[in-house]
Image (cartoon, rainbow, N blue to C red):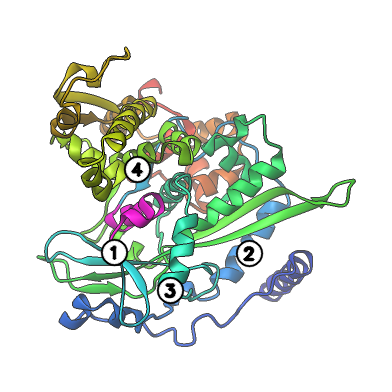
């Protein structure tokens, strides 16, 4: 039986190579015993020390081969779904929102507004500090994210890549954040997402002015950009959490498989694509529930779609939405100064320059009002704690003398979108009910069938195996306390009904 399985595996892989023309590297890790290097005092100060220690870890051995074979198995028969599985309740989902991922979103949205520096080893990086003495993350960019060990770019080449970053790539980044949060062991698991889902999540499916080839071409460019941001993490000992570094630079390891067809004019047209992704080794420390730096939150479909739709037209709004998504949590009660919001949206240098430039002040004040409206359209509730009423008036009012100081000195309080608050309440209620009444296998099976989902698709959506689905639906295994909230949201079930 084992020999037969090996033979079938080889035949499938050979066939896939013939069809896609893809060669797979089988020697990505020449030394699988190598692991992360212990952090010393010198390496905390000098990021180039960490770059010299890039080590391919055991988790990544033959990952390309496994991912591509999985893609072949699932591409032969498209899965049916009624609603985008990333947002099982059609509104929200859990996402990884750690400091590491926030930095990636900053690079994609803020671009050269950040403090990039050239280093003596000819690298170009942006340094982000958690808190004083509590860890540093050094961000770099690459133009070859598909390679096992991508090259970090020097200043001239890096500036070209950074300039091409599109704020809409932040929406793709958030999608990756949600997909990786659904995995039991994100440092070794992978996620798969196809063009049907991506068109739905980003809202491109509603664009009637674009043909499918144009939509997928836009997606292809943006899907690569989050993977073009690399990071070296240097973390000192903090209380019970020990010292660690992550010298494996990849945040996202993304493979994009495209399907082309030739039209009557002989032109190749992109008709389908599929993304196979895996997160980097950073997940062992920042997405591992047994560690001290675990951090997830809730994102909304409306925020993702708004980020994707506003793009370069309202870059300031995109930057504010990124900041709000990663920084504002349910326990956040502090007010935010208008000056801080302006600096997030347009950069501290531009705010400072506007002090001496009347025309720039007017333009930035106009942009600020418009961008705040866009943020509100995405579902975020902005409450003016201190400041003039004209800032939140729906009528066009002539600004008074001294309006610039009023904007900078205003205080704002932001509240989570209503969908997030509903999700938090629902999760709390479901967890309490769950302890009294577990779900039956028949109920789970019927709910899955009602959605038109196969066992394989349901398994992918849950981040589980098909055998797990079989065991749960036949009643030989109970859904764990940890998995039950996700299952309820995925199948849109409410325990108090049963």
- On the image, numbered disc 4 is attached to which residue? 319
Query: Which of label 1 and label 4 is nearer to you?
Result: 4
Q: Are discs 1 and 3 less than 8 Å apart at CB? A: no
Image location (x, y in percent) of residue 392: 25, 19
Please provide the residue range marked out in magenta. 98-116
Residue at 39%, 50% (x, y): give it.
Answer: 181
Compared with 374, 165 (above or below) is below
Q: Residue at point 66% right, 51% down?
A: 273
- Cα separation, mark 2 vs mark 1, equals 27 Å
- For label 3, the residue is 152
Query: Could you tell whether 313 is left or right of 25 in the image?
Result: left
The residue labelled by disc 2 is 68
What secondary structure is marked by label 3? loop
Marks 3 and 4, how far apart at CA: 25 Å
Mark 1 vs mark 3, CA separation in Å: 23 Å
Which residue position is annotated with label 1?
285
- State the SS at label 2: helix
Residue 234, relative to residue 411: is it above or below?
below
Residue 196 lies in the magenta stretch: no
Report the Cα–Cα distance between label 2 and label 4: 35 Å
- Can you give x and y, in whole percent of width and height, for residue 421 in the image? 28, 28
**Among numbered discs 2 and 1, the one appearing first in the sequence:** 2
53 relative to 128 in the view: left or right: right
């Amino acid at each position: 039986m084992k020999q037969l399985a090996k033979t079938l595996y080889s035949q499938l892989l050979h066939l896939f190579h013939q069809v896609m023309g893809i060669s797979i590297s089988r020697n990505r890790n020449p030394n699988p015993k190598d692991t992360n290097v212990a952090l010393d005092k010198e390496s905390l100060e000098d990021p180039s020390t960490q770059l010299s220690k890039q080590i391919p870890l055991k988790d990544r051995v033959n990952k390309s081969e496994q991912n591509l074979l999985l893609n072949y198995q699932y591409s032969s028969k498209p899965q049916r779904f009624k609603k985008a599985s990333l947002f099982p309740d059609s509104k929200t989902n859990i996402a990884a929102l750690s400091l590491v991922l926030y930095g990636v979103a900053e690079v994609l949205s803020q671009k050269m507004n950040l403090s990039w520096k050239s280093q003596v080893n000819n690298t170009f990086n942006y340094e982000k500090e958690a808190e004083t003495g509590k860890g540093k993350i050094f961000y770099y960019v690459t133009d070859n994210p598909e390679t096992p060990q991508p090259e970090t770019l020097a200043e001239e080449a890096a500036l070209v890549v950074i300039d091409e970053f599109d704020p809409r790539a932040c929406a793709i980044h958030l999608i990756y954040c949600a997909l990786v949060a659904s995995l039991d062991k994100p440092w070794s698991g992978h996620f798969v997402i196809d063009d049907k889902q991506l068109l739905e999540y980003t809202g491109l499916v509603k664009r009637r002015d674009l043909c499918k080839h144009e939509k997928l071409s836009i997606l292809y460019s943006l899907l690569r950009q989050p993977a073009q941001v690399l990071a070296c993490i240097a973390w000192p000992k903090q209380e019970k959490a020990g010292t660690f570094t992550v010298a494996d630079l990849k945040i996202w390891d993304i493979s994009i498989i495209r399907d082309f067809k030739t039209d009557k004019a002989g032109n190749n047209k992109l008709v389908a694509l599929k993304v196979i992704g895996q997160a980097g080794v950073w997940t062992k420390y920042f997405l591992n529930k047994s560690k001290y730096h675990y951090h997830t939150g809730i994102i909304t479909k409306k925020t993702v779609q708004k980020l994707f739709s506003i793009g370069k037209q309202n870059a300031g709004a995109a930057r504010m939405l990124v900041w709000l998504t990663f920084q504002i949590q349910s326990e956040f009660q502090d007010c935010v100064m208008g000056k801080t919001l302006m600096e997030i949206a347009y950069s501290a240098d531009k705010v400072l320059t506007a002090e001496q430039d009347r025309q720039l002040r007017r333009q930035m004040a106009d942009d600020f009002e418009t961008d705040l409206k866009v943020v509100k359209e995405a579902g975020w509730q902005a409450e003016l704690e201190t400041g003039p009423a004209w800032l939140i008036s729906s009528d066009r009012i002539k600004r008074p003398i001294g309006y610039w100081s009023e904007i900078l000195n205003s205080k704002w309080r932001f509240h989570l979108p209503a969908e997030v608050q509903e999700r938090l309440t629902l999760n709390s209620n479901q967890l309490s009910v769950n302890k009294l009444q577990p779900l039956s296998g028949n109920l789970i099976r019927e709910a899955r069938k009602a959605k038109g989902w196969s066992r394989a698709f349901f398994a992918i959506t849950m981040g589980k195996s098909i055998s797990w689905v079989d065991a749960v639906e036949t009643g030989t295994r109970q859904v764990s306390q940890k998995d039950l909230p996700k299952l309820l949201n995925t199948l849109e079930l409410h325990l108090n009904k049963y």
